[in-house]
């Protein structure tokens, strides 16, 4: 039997003026709380170390390099890795990555319980736009500051569990989950920064946004018979509201833990990963039931082609 208490470390806002060190101190507090609750795997949000900087338009893109990490761990995050090793907690968190050869990615890493990095993911589905958009109430410039991830959707055997990562907008795409489902994934971790309102549709408020997030996470879990942890950075960052709503979902698609605030908040769920086996061997036994001869369009085209 493989059992692990999974923790979701929802984080409240990080302001533009907050240093990495300040944010890491909060992450460490959440980790100590998680340790007291027996957590073995702790999930932090997308771009956990800083404010959600892609909302700020910078004419000169190089200015944005301030928000990127050139190595991981680094001086600011080393204490978090050391604490994880001391407490024996595996973790994942997101950050902006600047590679030695000058590439920019929205990245997350996965560690084992010794604080060693065992996996890396670079966000594939980048929402938003490249140039300043005067039509929007809030800018969302991920396409300006990041390149699409180049590592694919991978799964790692970590602490006896098959784990995979995705980031924020990826959760809205079924392909994300299925690529990991096809590797037998048992825990998908997804950090997010989701504005509480849709800057292009004033009618879509917090209630609808939370609904769509849960819908995506629950269906991804059910259709791939996997646990899913969707963990937010929430609250108001320099006047810009981000929704909370962090959840842990079981392989039947039911929410088994849910955050109640928009601040730093730990949620936990005691996950028995053997529960994944039922769905994977029956209704979602891919080897028996998938019909790949009819799925060609999924990888052959991006946009819609309507029939004549
Ligand atoms: N950080 C994100 O990827 N946010 C998107 C918003 C812009 C819709 C999301 O899918 O939550």
Image: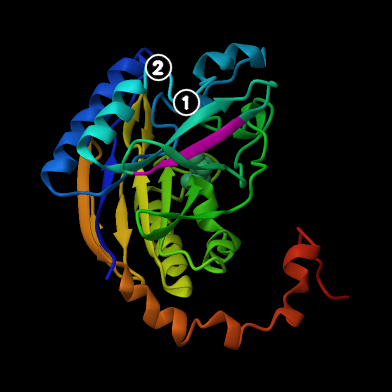
* Between 187 and 11, the one nearer to me in the picture: 187
* Residue 279 visible in the picture: yes
Q: Assign the N terminus to one quadrant of the image.
A: bottom left
Rate crowding at label 1 as few (under 14), some (14 to 19) or many (20 or more) other CA atoms within 10 Å.
some
Q: Quadrant of residue 251?
A: bottom left
Between disc 2 and disc 1, the foreground one is 1
**Tag 2 secondary structure:** loop
Q: Is residue 89 left or right of residue 136?
A: left
At a point 29% along the width and 22% down the height, the residue shown is 79
Residue 9: image location, x then y, percent: 27, 41
Q: CA distance from mark 2 to mark 1?
A: 21 Å
Name the foreground residue: 134 vs 171.
171
> Is 151 colored magenta in this rendering?
no
Q: Secondary structure at mark 1?
A: loop
Q: Which mark is residue 124?
A: none
**Residue 110 is inside the magenta segment:** yes
Q: Residue at x 36, y 34 (%)?
A: 241
Depth check, front residue: 180 or 2? 2
In the picture, measured across the screen, residue 308 lies left or right of residue 174, that is right
Q: Residue at x 41, y 67 (%)?
A: 226
Q: Quadrant of the rendered structure where residue 63 is?
A: top right
Residue tagged 1 = 72
Percent of width and height locating residue 91? 34, 42
Q: Which residues are magenta?
A: 105-112
Vertical placement of residue 220 versus 92, above or below: below
Q: Quadrant of the C terminus?
A: bottom right
3 relative to 163 in the view: left or right: left
Q: Earlier in the sequence, mark 2 or mark 1?
A: 2
Residue 222 in the image: state x and y as whole percent: 42, 73
Q: Position of residue 126 (x, y in %)?
A: 61, 42
* Left-right relation of 131 to 187: right
| Residue position marked by numbered label 2 in the rendering | 16
């Amino acid at each position: 039997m493989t059992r692990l208490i999974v923790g979701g470390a929802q984080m409240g806002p990080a302001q533009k003026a907050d240093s990495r060190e300040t944010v890491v101190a909060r992450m460490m507090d959440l980790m100590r709380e998680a340790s007291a609750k027996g957590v073995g795997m702790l999930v932090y949000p997308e771009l956990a170390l800083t404010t959600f900087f892609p909302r700020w338009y910078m004419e000169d893109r190089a200015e944005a390099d301030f928000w990127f990490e050139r190595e991981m761990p680094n001086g600011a995050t080393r204490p978090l890795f050391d604490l994880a090793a001391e407490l024996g907690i595996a973790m994942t968190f997101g950050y902006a990555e600047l590679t030695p050869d000058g590439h920019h990615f929205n990245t997350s890493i996965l560690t084992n319980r010794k604080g060693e990095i065992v996996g890396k993911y670079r966000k594939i589905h980048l929402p938003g736009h490249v140039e300043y958009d005067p039509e929007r109430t809030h800018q969302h410039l991920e396409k300006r500051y990041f390149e699409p991830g180049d590592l694919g959707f991978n799964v790692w055997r970590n602490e006896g569990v098959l784990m995979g990562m995705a980031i924020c907008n990826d959760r809205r795409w079924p392909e994300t989950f299925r690529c990991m489902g096809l590797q037998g994934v048992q825990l998908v971790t997804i950090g997010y920064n989701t504005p509480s309102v849709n800057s292009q549709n004033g009618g879509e408020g917090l209630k609808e946004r939370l609904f769509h997030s849960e819908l995506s996470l629950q269906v991804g879990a059910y259709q791939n018979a996997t646990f899913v942890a969707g963990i937010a950075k929430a609250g108001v960052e320099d006047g810009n509201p981000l929704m909370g709503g962090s959840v842990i979902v079981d392989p039947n698609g039911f929410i088994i833990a849910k955050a109640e605030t928009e601040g730093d908040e730990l949620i936990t769920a005691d996950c028995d990963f053997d529960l994944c086996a039922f769905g994977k061997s029956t209704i979602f036994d891919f080897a028996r039931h998938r019909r790949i001869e009819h799925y060609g369009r999924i990888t052959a085209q991006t946009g819609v082609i309507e029939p004549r």
